Image: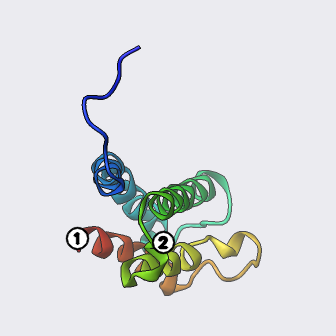
Amino acid sequence: MTEPDEITTSAQRLQRWSRAVNPFVIVAAILPLGPLASGEETTAGPELVVALASWMVFAVDFAVRTRLGDAFLATWKGRLYLAIVVVTFPVYVLVPGLEETDLLAVSRLGWLAVLAI
């Protein structure tokens, strides 16, 4: 067994997580915009799988950041992450007719803005 040379702080673990997951979050934010921009059906087939998978990436990222960050939800960035996770849930899976909301597309771009901050 190898032991770590140094004890890592929660800030270091969070930074390491961010470096590892940010490319996946960027792809998860951009990939579902294709069907939304082209007007294709997003409630069935591969588009639905992509929408659900990208939301799972956001949800897992949020959960890990909440776990690693000290009082993450007490910060404005933590509350913004939570809002984006809630808003980007593909609700049109549960309520047909809501797939054409622009809020979904804009909120996915919100992830890119949060990563840039």
In three-dimensional space, the C-alpha distance between marks 2 and 1, rounded to whole angstroms, equals: 23 Å
Q: Which residue is mark 2?
A: 36
Placement of 25 over or under 90, stated as above or below: above
Return the residue nearer the eye: 43 or 65: 65
Return the residue nearer the eye: 84 or 98: 84
Total marks in image: 2
**Mark toward the start of the polypeptide (2 vs 1):** 2
Report which quarter residue 101 is drawn in: bottom right
Query: Going by the image, does 95 lie left or right of 20?
Result: right
Number of other residues with Cα within 10 Å of mark 1, as a class: few under 14, some 14 to 19, many 20 or more: few
Query: Going by the image, does 7 lie left or right of 108?
Result: left
* Quadrant where the N terminus is found in the figure: top left
The percent position of residue 97, horizontal first and vertical second, equals 70, 82
Report which quarter residue 7 is drawn in: top left
The residue sitting at 51% across, 76% down in the picture is 82
Query: Going by the image, does 59 lie left or right of 43?
Result: left
The percent position of residue 75, horizontal first and vertical second, equals 40, 81
Placement of 87 over or under 30, stated as above or below: below
Disc 2 marks a residue whose amino acid type is Leu
The residue sitting at 45% across, 81% down in the picture is 74
Number of other residues with Cα within 10 Å of mark 2, as a class: few under 14, some 14 to 19, many 20 or more: some
Q: Are marks 2 and 1 in contact (CB under 8 Å)?
A: no
The residue sitting at 38% across, 50% down in the picture is 24
Q: Residue 116 has which mark?
A: 1
Q: Residue 26 has which mark?
A: none
Dot 2 falls on a residue whose secondary structure is helix
The residue sitting at 53% across, 56% down in the picture is 60
Dot 1 falls on a residue whose secondary structure is helix
Disc 1 marks a residue whose amino acid type is Ala
* Quadrant where the C terminus is found in the figure: bottom left
Report which quarter residue 116 is drawn in: bottom left
Q: Nearer the viewer, mark 2 or mark 1?
A: 1
